[in-house]
Image (cartoon, rainbow, N blue to C red):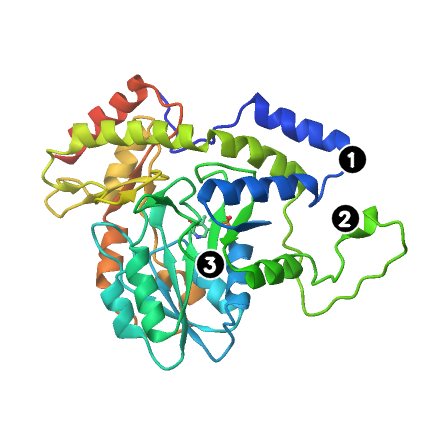
Amino acid sequence: MKIPLAKPYLDKEDAQNAYDTILTGWVTQGPRVQEFEEKFANYVGSKYAVALSNCTTALHLAMIVAGVTADDEVICPSMSYVATANSIRYVGAKVVFAEVNPTTYNIDVDDVRKKITSKTKAILIVHQIGMPADIDAFKDLCNEKNLVLIEDAACAAGSSYKGNKIGSHSDLVCFSFHPRKVITTGDGGMITTNNEAYRDRIKLLRQHAMSINDRIRHESDKVIFEDHVELGYNYRMTDIQAAVGIKQLEKLDKIVAERRKVAFKYHQALKDINCIQLPLEADGYFSNYQSYNVYLKPACKISRNDLMQALLDEGISTRRGVTTAHRETAYKNYQSNYSLPISEDTSDRSIVLPLFYPMTDNEINYVIDHFIRLVQ
Ligand SMILES: *Cc1c(COP(=O)(O)O)cnc(C)c1O
């Protein structure tokens, strides 16, 4: 048997909507992007949503509209995809890494508090592999210290916190639609917000800071000229991508429900193994299980890397757990004196098991049987 780590759920309906969009002749940011934005905002329960080329560009624009500049510091977890920290460097600000909680893999509020200085401008939290961070704790901290909260929700479309969808809790929530996430547009991103000024500035910046967008110009019966009012970017999503996103979004809750069924089967089968720690979903937290991460305690008879190889020898693809940005080469000469022992240990001892929809019981049991045989 050959079991991949992940595969996107894409169907004929997604393809048909892209096909139809291409034949309309309008392929870049236009009516489908607007429709996707309205539907996404409605889905998460935010006032507005602005579509972008990917989550990394979304994070970059979030930094800009939050007012983060080269004199500032922004606190984020090191244990995240490297794009999280990179987005802070794009605006020239200093990245300050905080530890994660070893059971949720999410950024630790007590460590963040210790790392706040007079230069801190924002806190960038991550809903790691789909598990919501404790948003209220960070909102309170940001209110107390007058900081901007930014959420990296790249993996968290369809997850919820205290009964509300991720995307509804604060004003700069950034999503990804890369194929490794729960729904995909090939590449794509979205920012949700209730703040009209943020929305307008993000819309401006994503399209070269052009005072009149090409759709308005196209539809106008008067000759009009645009101005470029500040340094802008091309971070647009295309209408072809949005057409796929509209249809993917309709299936999001179904995909999440099916992913959770697989996660619970893993949980049931593995919960009595003493040398591992399974993902913890506390009360009020609802994960889309973008990834199913297992932590191997020192008592396991096999190392993480040997386990990955042994599983691959059986045809089962896995990945190491979330990596740490501070140990990437791009951060070697960036700053020194990192002390992030929990992040390093959590990252080094974690393995991500295959999880996708549809995944058959046969496939799930094959992974479980080999995993149990090898770890204990
Ligand atoms: C995937 C991911 C990103 C980057 O998303 P793209 O859409 O590929 O730019 C950023 N942060 C986290 C936590 C991610 O998992």
Q: Earlier in the sequence, mark 2 or mark 1?
A: 1
26 displayed left or right of 125: right
- The reply to whether discs 2 and 1 touch (Cβ–Cβ < 8 Å) is no
Q: Residue 364, how many percent across, how many down?
A: 28, 24
Residue density around tag 3, few if under 14, some if 14–19, many if 20 or more, within 10 Å: many
Q: Quadrant of residue 226?
A: bottom right
> On screen, 353 above or below 213?
above
Q: Is residue 82 visible?
A: no
Q: Which residue is identified by label 2?
A: 215
Count of residue discs? 3
Identify the residue under disc 3.
Answer: 171
Look at the image and tell me whether residue 22 can be seen. Answer: yes
Q: Residue furthest top?
A: 362
As measured in the structure, the alpha-carbon distance from the residue carrying label 3 to the one carrying label 2 is: 26 Å
| Residue 12 pos. (x, y %) | 58, 21
Q: Amino acid at mark 2?
A: Arg
The residue pinned by badge 1 equals 25
Label 3 sits on what residue type? Asp
